[in-house]
Image (cartoon, rainbow, N blue to C red):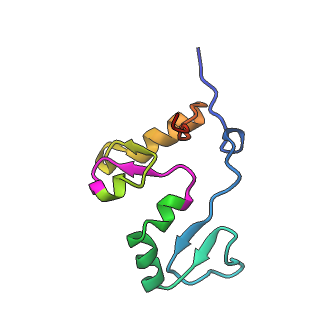
């Protein structure tokens, strides 16, 4: 039995816009594929956990600090254990990883 991978769109992903401190390449527009920002703003966003909170599904690696984990909806394996790949595989397999409302 073979498993057909699902596309990101079929998982409800509308798109991903990353943040970067590099300069835009020719034809790139701020806010389309990347938000271009300066180093100080980027570091502040990391320290304030703005990027994790905005994600909709905040995933922390096993080797993240306990403070960072407190902002995450889900914890995965460490970066050395391919934690991001494990979460992406689960999402593409159709697993709903969204946080459940507390009752």
| Residue 42, x across and y down, in percent | 46, 77
Q: Hey, which residue is sitting farthest front in the picture? A: 103
Q: Is residue 78 left or right of residue 19?
A: left
Residue 90 to residue 64: above or below: above
Q: How many marks?
A: 0
Which is nearer the eye, 63 or 66? 66
Residue at 67% of width from left, 78% of height from top? 30
Residue at 43% of width from left, 51% of height from top? 72
Quadrant (top left, top right, bottom left, bottom right) of the N terminus? top right
Residue 34 to residue 53: above or below: below
Residue 96 to residue 76: above or below: above
Q: Hey, which residue is sitting farthest top in the picture? A: 1
Which is nearer the eye, 46 or 92? 46
Check if residue 79 falls in the magenta segment.
no
| Residue 31, x across and y down, in percent | 67, 73
Which is nearer the eye, 59 or 15? 59
Which is nearer the eye, 81 or 1? 81
| Magenta segment | 54-66
Secondary structure of the magenta portion, mostly?
loop
| Residue 16, x across and y down, in percent | 63, 59
Residue at 46% of width from left, 46% of height from top? 73
Residue 48 to residue 36: above or below: above
The quadrant in which residue 96 appears is: top right
Residue at 27% of width from left, 51% of height from top? 63
Q: Is residue 61 left or right of residue 19?
A: left
The quadrant in which residue 75 appears is: top left
| Residue 91, x across and y down, in percent | 56, 37
């Amino acid at each position: 039995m073979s498993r057909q991978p699902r596309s990101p769109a079929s998982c409800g992903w509308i798109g991903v816009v990353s943040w970067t401190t590099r300069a835009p390449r020719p034809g790139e527009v701020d806010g389309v594929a990347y938000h271009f920002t300066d180093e100080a703003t980027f570091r502040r966003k990391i320290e304030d956990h703005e990027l994790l909170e905005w994600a909709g599904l905040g995933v922390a690696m096993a080797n993240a600090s306990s403070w960072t984990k407190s902002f995450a909806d889900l914890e995965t394996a460490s970066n050395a254990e391919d934690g991001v790949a494990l979460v992406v595989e689960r999402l593409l397999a159709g697993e709903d990883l969204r946080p459940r409302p507390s009752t």
